Image (cartoon, rainbow, N blue to C red):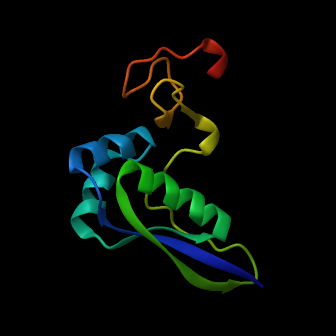
Amino acid sequence: MVKKYRVLFHGLTEDEEAFKARMVGLGAPGDTVDKMIREAPVVLKGGLTLGAARDYAEAVQEAGGRVKIEEQGHFEEPAHVEISSPIASFENFTMCPECGLKQRKGETCIKCGFRFASSEQ
């Protein structure tokens, strides 16, 4: 049996507009982010291994959210969990060498405007 975990969103640690912009940058639809903020606390994602839950929680925390990881139970086989927020895979991200912001890969940094080398794409 494998323990599974879920990530709960409990609110904001930073400005709402900055949080929304960062979450949209992670791939979450704007209306989903609005709903998260309005209805907190909410389950963002469940059925995760502890490592995956920590990675997911870290991304939301860096965007400015307060999160908690809770044990969800034990499962014989992989759980079929409905994903409420389609956040992109970590392979789709890069860190700006100029300001250090973790963000989706693109041509320029969304915070400082640094132009990334085409080899990062």
Residue 69 sits above or below residue 11 on the image:
below
Residue 30 relative to residue 76: left or right: left
Q: Is residue 25 left or right of residue 37?
A: right
Where is residue 12? Give x, y as percent. 28, 60
Of 74 and 113, nearer the camera is 113
Quadrant where the N terminus lies? bottom right
User: For this rendering, which residue is in front, 19 or 87?
Assistant: 19
Q: Residue at x 36, y 58 (%)?
A: 65
Residue 102's spot in the image, x, y percent? 50, 38
The residue drawn where x is 48% and y is 35% is 103
Q: Residue at x 29, y 65 (%)?
A: 11
Against 73, residue 108 (above or below) is above
Judged left or right of residue 52, residue 85 is: left
Q: Quadrant of the C terminus?
A: top right
Depth order, front residue of 4/103: 103
Residue 26 image offset from top left, x and y in percent: 45, 43
Q: Is residue 88 above or below residue 53?
A: above
